[in-house]
Amino acid sequence: MKRTIALSILSAALSVATVASAGTLQLNIAFKGAETRAVWETLIKEFEQANPGVTTKVAFVEEETYKVQLPAWLTSVAPDGINWHEGERMAYYAKRGLLEDLSADWKKNDWNAQFASLKTASSYDGKQYAMPTQYFAWGLYYRKDLFEKAGVKGEPKNWQEFLDDCKKLKAAGIAPIAVGGRDSWTLAAWFDYLDLRMNGYDFHMKLMNGEIPYTDTRVKNVYLAWKTLIDNKYFIDNPLSYSLDSVQPLYIQGQAAMMLMGTFLSPGLPPATKVQTGFFKFPIVDPKVTPAEDGSAECLNIPMRAANKADARKFLAFMGQPDNDATLAKGVGTLPANNKAAMPDDPIARIGFQILSETKGGVAQFYDRDMTKEMADEGMKGMQRFISDPSKLDDILADLEKTRKRVYSKS
């Protein structure tokens, strides 16, 4: 999105927040796609009907712009409620005193029981600063019709089968893998899964916590495995020129066979594409490593500078109810955070739930949600450099190691 559009969105959101007063609830909601926005609008309308004394004003902001503008909102004229990411992403702002303590709400609303599995991800320093809304699994979307056309039989279970299938797809004139590398976090999914499959959950989390050098041979080996896909041209051409939004048509139109992405992508697929879509777990790379998964969670928060915290608490309590949580999850293709909510009937979401429920190797949040923000930002820039020119790998890792030493020397 162009800078001028992003700035106009921020201006509009701040102007709305400025006029908010008691009885007016200002929400800033990140969204990706019409389906996501529509389900939020439906639930917010139902909240207003249940709370006739509250007038809700909502600024819907495209997700990538939202990430950039959120710090300015939290440190200036803050909205009353925001949606955000659990784990380190949430803790980053809680640590800086920018989010309201919701510990009393957890006790009052029975969230300790209903959101038990995500309490740790919602906490910082023993207090809760978030209410979980939904979580999603990751895996490889694939076109069954393109697999059949290329002579690929079934879903690959291990890395060699995956490479063989990519070779068959490329020989059939089909780009094996679509990725929107302009959104750097889409590249981070590839690093996460290769690292989890090659080095395991404990190593991965130590790396996320800044405890392992980027010049470690095990980190380099992850990039070398990734480099195999690049060298064989298994990714689409010029992946850095595509965002997630702009790359999806390549998959939808049958020009690319696979995408590594979260289950949230599923609701936006056209019916004709969805019929041809399967979803499988990232292949085993080292059979000696117990497979771990990414299972990213989303949440709602109340900024510390919010003007109308009382109504914001009512909104969180409303959204946390099992039926409402189930509606949100169904609408955006994720899994409800509330353990009393009904599971969605979306087939991709159900496969994702099975992947997470069966994993024995651990569940990570995601690269930029498990790592301190400054390191994550530099790490993902390094991934874009790597995709652009894999021959610079040693220089990239050396630069990341300098950043690691600098960032983690502060803590």
Image (cartoon, grey):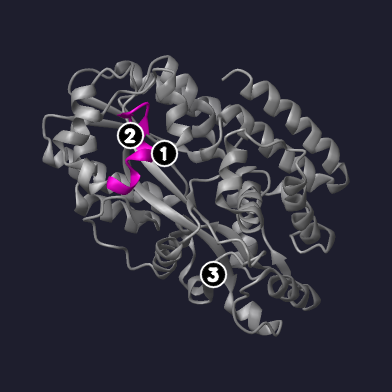
Comes first in the chain, label 1 or label 3 = 1
Residue in the picture at 29% in, 24% down: 101
**Residue occupying the point 65% across, 62% down:** 250
Label 1 to label 3: alpha-carbon separation = 25 Å
Question: What residue is pinned by disc 2?
Answer: 130
Location of mark 1 (residue): 86
Q: Is residue 15 left or right of residue 208?
A: left
Q: Is residue 45 visible?
A: no
- Work out whether residue 131 or residue 61 is closer to the camera in this orientation and state it: 131
Quarter location, residue 81: top left
> What residue is at 39 percent from the left and 17 percent from the top?
97
Image coordinates for residue 365, horizontal then vertical, percent: 48, 46
**Disc 2 packing (10 Å; few <14; some 14–19; many ≥20):** many
Asked whether the beta carbons under mark 1 and mark 2 sit within 8 Å of each other, the answer is yes
Q: Which residues are magenta?
A: 116-129
Q: Secondary structure at mark 1?
A: loop
List the residue tagged with mark 3. 280
